[in-house]
Amino acid sequence: MALALAPRRSVSRLRQVLTPLVAFLVALIVAGSVLAAMGKSLKIAAEVYIVEPLTSSWGVQEVILKATPLTLIAIGLIFAIRANRWNIGAEGQYVIGGMAGGAVAIATHGMGAPWILPAMLAAGVLAGVAYGALPALLRNRFGISEILSSLMLVYVAELLLDYLVRGPWRDPKAYNFPKSVNFDAAATLGPIAEGLKLHWGVVLALVVVVVAALVLARSLFGFAVSATGEAPRAANFAGFNDRRLTMQVFAISGGLAGLAGVIEVSANIGQLQPSIGQGYGFTAIIVAFLGRLNPMGALVAALALSMLIIGSETAQVMLKLPFDMTRAFMGLLLLCVLAGEALTRFRLVRT
Amino acid sequence: MELAALILATVITAATPLVIAGLGEHVVERSGVLNLGVEGMMIMGAAVGFAGAVLLDSSWTGLVIGALAGMAMAAVFGLFALGLATNQVATGLAITILGLGLAGLIGQPFVGQPRPPLAPLEIPGLVAIPHLGPALFRQDAVVYLSLVLVLAVGWVLNVSRAGLVLRGVGESHVSAHALGLPVLKVRWQAVLFGGLCAGLAGAYLSLVYTRFWSPGMTAGRGWIALALVVFAGGRVWRLMAGAYLFGAILIAQLHAQAGAIGIPSQFLSMLPYLMTIVALIVLSLAGRRGAGAAGSLGQPFVPER
């Protein structure tokens, strides 16, 4: 007996919504079995990864904070993936955005003017757009796979940041530590209210979610994106310019990754250091798929993955589990989500 | 050995994993499948191969185990991308992320443990050639294996009937299926071969090239191997030439860092990644844009029933 795929004629709305949830559960069950086989306590694991981040006020805020860059980057990636363009270099665009915003903060150190923060955000977005446009340009002009070029540029961005904070941008008073000066208050994206850790970047991310959902569902551009992804020839006949669209989706995803970078640097890290990303750019790819390429879905998916990332920080101490465990789980989760998507389109039949 | 010969010998060692992994992916892409999981399969080969070599105290066994680990990851890829017809790009990325995570877990207890080098194999007679002889003909057996592999893959793909079938499946899976060729079976074989090669390449990195395990040690080599396949445009000899060019860049970069020539080390470390892009631009300017890619590359195949 062998199994084969047969297309489904229609897919119910319920199945579409349940698929990512089931995929998430299956991934949790597999990961749980692995943990149990490793002799770890599942009770403590559930406590650390799920209960603790969701019950303490500290934990909930941290979950929202980490979900912010993930959501922003994933929203941008949704535009690209829907158009069947593969920007897997969001991590690089995030780093460049943080770097450009940080450059403004360092250059204006001690000035304390009100325009500094808007200038930082603008610099971060523009730098992300420019860096994201590179793979699109290479694809349009030279026919180079955007997958490879965007990924290669991640390494370049990380090395550039490393050079800057060890070289020209190093704080001379930092005892040779590779870090820039601490940003002024004027260069810091502050909390929404006194005593909260949540900052204005969170609000910005929510606005982006709503705008993106509207653009994708209601605008001609949103239609062009989906049409190009699903039926490139038809989209071409409809007059949508393939190359311009490539440039646009890369600019959007680069810009949002850059925005995420500058928000993270300004609101959370407060300085530039050799490593400002935590692989957000790669995790966001999983967020985008788990959210079914839908902005609202991505928001929920980002919160779910953020919870696990927070949990993994505690798990390193409590369960002696390295961050690699979380990374492996992310890969497993993406596989489960893809399998779930396949099983909404096809059913397995005996042959 | 004199300095130039010594450098040449290290270039060959640096290029060998790229040759092997690139050849594997070359076969995969000829069959019409794009497996972006090379980096993940490679690092699994590096970690599992190293662990196996330490536990069984044999680098040779480690190389075999590493190759099998890469093949196991490829089997996971096949299960999803071929069995369930999932998106190949996303599935490959998942394999890379999964591989990086698993390899980190598996390699953790082995960080910092050294391995002895593989004994070099001298080719009698040829090794006596002045200057070049010791560099080219006193290498480890895997280097020779990689060269045999280049010839074998080139022959199978271009001359044998099996190669014709494989290329046919890659060029148009619809036509191949109509002709009664077993599309999915051929693709499964290609994907597993690709994983075997990537795993062996990874194990070679940790067991022969660096001779220790460190997390993330493949450092994008899997992606460079993918770029080499594009660069090769369907010809194995060009893939090999590209791999040796990159081996030379990797080694030149190391020497420049050690030699303190005044360029910050970070810029030198960028070279392999920037050169990948430059190589693809040059290829495009030479007028061979997209030449040689299989017609059905990256498209999932679900047989009509």
Image (cartoon, coloured by chain):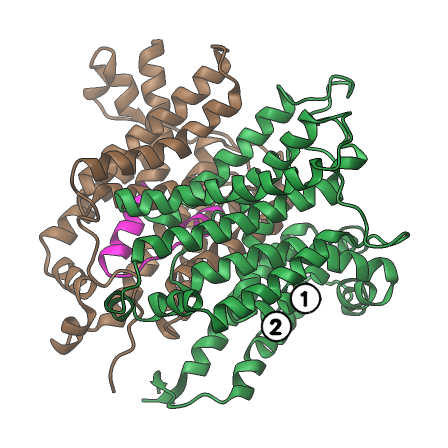
Chain colours: A green, B brown
**Residue at image location 80% in from the left, 67% down from the top:** A54
Q: Residue A121's spot in the image, x, y percent?
A: 63, 43
Q: Which numbered marker is on residue A24?
A: 2
Depth check, front residue: A342 or B199 = A342
Describe residue B24's horizontal placement relative to residue A212 as left or right.
left
Q: Residue A320's spot in the image, x, y percent?
A: 76, 52
Q: Residue B270's spot in the image, x, y percent?
A: 46, 29
Q: Amino acid at mark 2?
A: Phe
Depth check, front residue: A160 or A98 = A98
Cα–Cα gap, marks 2 and 1: 9 Å
Q: Are marks 2 and 1 in contact (CB under 8 Å)?
A: yes
Describe residue A288's horizontal placement relative to residue B191 as left or right.
right
- Dot 1 corresponds to which residue? A304
Residue farthest to the right? A195
* Local crowd size for mark 1, using a 10 Å CA cut-off: few (<14), some (14–19), many (≥20): some
Residue B32 counted in the magenta span: yes
Q: Which numbered marker is on residue B78?
A: none
